[in-house]
């Protein structure tokens, strides 16, 4: 049996810091395209706004993003991005400090 609309698949994500479990879905192709477009602009505020808008859409409004800490928004975004890219993702982190 094939799934006709894979975007209708909902995943559960426990957020212990907020004492709640939310539902989310994988990113849609259009959302990925918009994110890539914003990344090319290299405007930090535009990137943050795009990520917040995407998280609002993928969580079905279950999070009050005005009151949710940004690290949780980033975490939810990352979980969704991983689901949409085949359950594997590489990440690079840059340390701003000196050694």
Image (cartoon, rainbow, N blue to C red):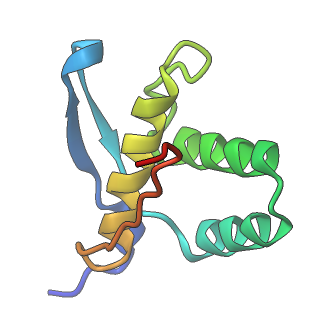
Nearest to the observer: residue 48 or residue 53: 48
Where 24 sits versus 25, above or below? above
Question: Which quadrant: the N terminus?
Answer: bottom left
What residue is rendered at 56% in x and 24% in y? 65
Quadrant of res 12: top left
What residue is rendered at 47% in x and 57% in y? 94
Does residue 79 appear to the left or right of 98 in the view shown? Answer: left
Instruction: Count every numbered label the image shows and give the total.
Output: 0
Does residue 98 appear to the left or right of 23 in the view shown? Answer: right
Where 12 sits versus 1, above or below? above
**Which residue is the extreme one toward the bottom?**
2
Does residue 49 appear to the left or right of 54 in the view shown? Answer: right
Rendering coords of residue 95 (x, y %): 45, 50
Rendering coords of residue 72 (x, y %): 40, 31
Nearest to the observer: residue 67 or residue 92: 92
What residue is rendered at 29% in x and 53% in y? 10
**Which residue is the extreme one toward the left?**
1
Quadrant of res 52: top right
Rendering coords of residue 4 (x, y %): 35, 80
**Which residue is the extreme one toward the front?**
99
Nearest to the observer: residue 38 or residue 61: 38
Where 58 sits versus 83, above or below? above
Where 59 sits versus 3, above or below? above
What residue is rendered at 36% in x and 67% in y? 91
């Amino acid at each position: 049996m094939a799934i006709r609309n894979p975007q209708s698949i909902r995943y559960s994500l426990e957020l212990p810091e907020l004492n709640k479990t939310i539902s989310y879905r994988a990113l849609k192709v259009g959302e990925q395209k918009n994110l890539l477009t914003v990344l090319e602009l290299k405007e930090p505020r535009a990137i943050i706004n795009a990520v917040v808008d995407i998280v609002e859409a993928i969580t079905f409004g279950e999070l009050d993003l005005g009151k949710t800490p940004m690290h949780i928004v980033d975490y939810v975004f990352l979980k969704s991005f991983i689901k949409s890219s085949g359950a594997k993702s590489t990440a690079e982190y840059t340390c701003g400090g000196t050694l």
